[in-house]
Image: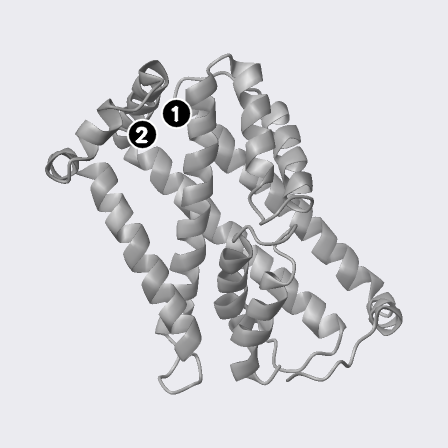
Amino acid sequence: RPRVAYGLASTMRRLGEHPGQIAAVALVLALLVAMTAWRWHALVVALGLRLGRWRALGLTWIGGFFNLAVPGSTGGDVVKAWYAAKDTGAGPRAVLTVFVDRVIGLVGLVLLAALVLAVQPAGDGQSAARRVVLISGVAMLVMGIVFMVRPLRRRLGLAKLVGRLPFQHVIAELRAGLALYRRRPLALAGALGISLVNHAGSALAVAALADALDIQGATPAACLAAVPLANLLSAIPLAPGGWGVGEWAFATFLAPHGV
């Protein structure tokens, strides 16, 4: 069990000793929000929807706020999708852009963690992290194959199942949107590239905060492996902002590094 070494007062005092470093971290985190908005706006444009860049940035900030106020770290997506549907007048497709943006973000988390863990030596105490990456990667691969291969969906009977659902006009719009995305692989690849840069920046920001707090072991390499997985598990809707789940994940995945 980790010992409690930092209370609120001591944490604020330690951070206060590095004002320039903390200001730089705050600026980086703000830029990462802008990159997230840029990624989502590209996915909106790929479906032929009209939404201004500044509006996309504003809705991304609003969604980020609600991510901290509702269970899990993805609840703000519902708020963002509601406003996007209202602004564009294309309800189902607008919601689809938010969903695809979130999926690409999660894929980026798993891919970044996998790349970092792949270059680390075996037997380094990262077995729990590797299991999470493996399970998440396999699940995403299976869903991606089902999404991309239409004959497979027919064989699995998913087409018949969807055909029996209500609101077929909404489902038809979603299908049309998914078909457009399948014909725009470059847009999806670009969004994934932005996602990787975004998550790497977030991990390095955590490393900079750890350095300001004089936390030994939370090196940039350690954070690049641990932070994406902690953020992935924080998306589980158990508590507002993923609180509790995220702290447990950080403690678990950073422990092998001596934190």
Residue 211 appears at what percent x and percent y? Answer: 70, 73
Residue at (17, 36) in percent of width and height: 153
Disc nearer the start of the sequence (1/2): 1
Left or right of 165? Residue 64 is: right
Q: Quadrant of residue 212?
A: bottom right
Residue 258 appears anywhere in the view: yes
Residue at (44, 50) in percent of width and height: 106
User: What amino acid does circle 1 point to?
Assistant: Ala
Left or right of 72? Residue 118 is: left
User: What amino acid does circle 2 point to?
Assistant: Tyr
Residue 84 appears at what percent x and percent y? Answer: 55, 22
* Nearer-the-camera pick, 122 or 238: 238
**10 Å crowding of disc 2: few (<14), some (14-19), many (20+):** some
Residue 156 appears at what percent x and percent y? Answer: 15, 40
Residue at (52, 83) in percent of width and height: 256
Left or right of 130? Residue 149 is: left
Q: Quadrant of residue 110?
A: bottom left
Image position of 49 with respect to 254: above or below: above
- Tell me the tag on residue 46: 1
Which color mode does the image show?
one colour
* Nearer-the-camera pick, 170 or 42: 170
Residue at which label 2 appears: 181
Residue at (56, 41) in percent of width and height: 35
Secondary structure of the residue carrying tag 1 is helix
Image quarter where the N terminus lies is bottom right
Q: Are marks 1 and 2 in contact (CB under 8 Å)?
A: yes
Residue 150 appears at what percent x and percent y? Answer: 16, 33
Image position of 22 with respect to 248: above or below: above
Secondary structure of the residue carrying tag 2 is helix
Left or right of 167? Residue 24 is: right
